[in-house]
Image: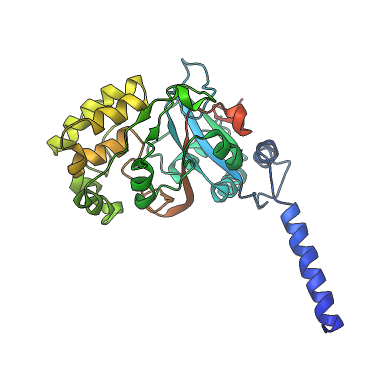
Amino acid sequence: MLCPMFVSTSILLLLFSSTSLAQCISSAEEYINHFRDVLAGSEPDPSTCVDTDLMVSIQYQSKQYDISPTLNFRNGSWSWASGWDNLETYLRMAEKHRNDDDQGLELTHEMINWVGIPGTVDTESIYNLAVFSRALMTESAFDDLPVMPSWPNLWNYLANPAGIVLCSNWTHDLAECPLALPIEFTEEVKVALETDTLVNFEAITGCPTDPPPPNTEDCICTNTDYCSMKAQLWTARATGTYSCVTSFSETPGATENAAQTRAFFEFCMGCNYLFSGNGTGYNGQMFTGEEWLVRGNVPLVDVGAVRLQLYPQQ
């Protein structure tokens, strides 16, 4: 039999926990409204917790194009997202920059650098914060997405015997999606990429990382295998993820070559030189929380997404 004091304490703890849980932001709309209020100064407290179902991605694309209705503005099959922990971090950044008079320039710069997008804000681009539901994203995928992109998870995902689902456009019908054949990498390649991932990019590719090479078609790296594969995939990805993936997988010896494989992960899947390989984001200085590979061409409306334009602020 429990003593009255223990029962009372238990009830108080339960009530406190329930109250704390109830106060967490649980929808994309609620988060965007709260973010906007923190940034405006009408909500002084940026420390509100965020439900673990919510995910976030920072989208950016040239002002000359219409805003993409999907996460990947190129309509690619894959995109990247962060979890609830980065959403909480972004609220603190909003408070920090609430008095800035720069159309959101410094706020956006801090946010993209935090999540591992290097460089400065491109003032000729539009940056949007897209918040959406992980549960709805899971329902919208035909395979194992979303997946936390550790190396072991990526090897398994790409080697799925059923094939790699690479829809060139959004569809609810799996039969309309091309399937790339499973990709099996050699153990030597796996070991090379997994060993000291945070510092081995330059050794494998011959690319400088301080500063990193520009995101252009030109290759200034010293590894010719990497540069030749980059040129090949840069062209292939222009017609979609399926073309990029099959261009790599059908190249003799590519899955046995660490430099060419690293180019595949960079240009077909978006794993830049800051990719950690352990399932968490990395920005060059610290790990920043959950990281996810998600379906990139699902309409945002289907995953309960709400967007807020970060730069230039409206």
In front of the other: 191 or 126:
191
| Res 307 seen here | no
Identify the image quadrant of residue 55: top right
Tell whether 300 sits left or right of 239: right
- Taking the spot 70% from the left edge, 51% from the top edge, the residue there is 24
Q: Position of residue 71 (x, y in %)?
A: 50, 30
User: Which quadrant of the figure contains the N terminus?
Assistant: bottom right
- Residue 4 sits above or below residue 189 on the image: below
Identify the image quadrant of residue 229: top left
| Res 31 seen here | yes
In front of the other: 39 or 158:
158
User: Which quadrant of the figure contains the C terminus?
Assistant: top right
- Taking the spot 52% from the left edge, 23% from the top edge, the residue there is 171
Tell whether 314 sits left or right of 147: right
Q: How is the image coloured?
A: rainbow
Q: Position of residue 173 (x, y in %)?
A: 52, 25
- Taking the spot 36% from the left edge, 23% from the top edge, the residue there is 240
Q: Position of residue 201 (x, y in %)?
A: 25, 47
Q: Position of residue 49 (x, y in %)?
A: 66, 52
Task: Count up the numbered dots.
Answer: 0
**In the image, farthest residue toward the right:** 4
Identify the image quadrant of residue 74: top left
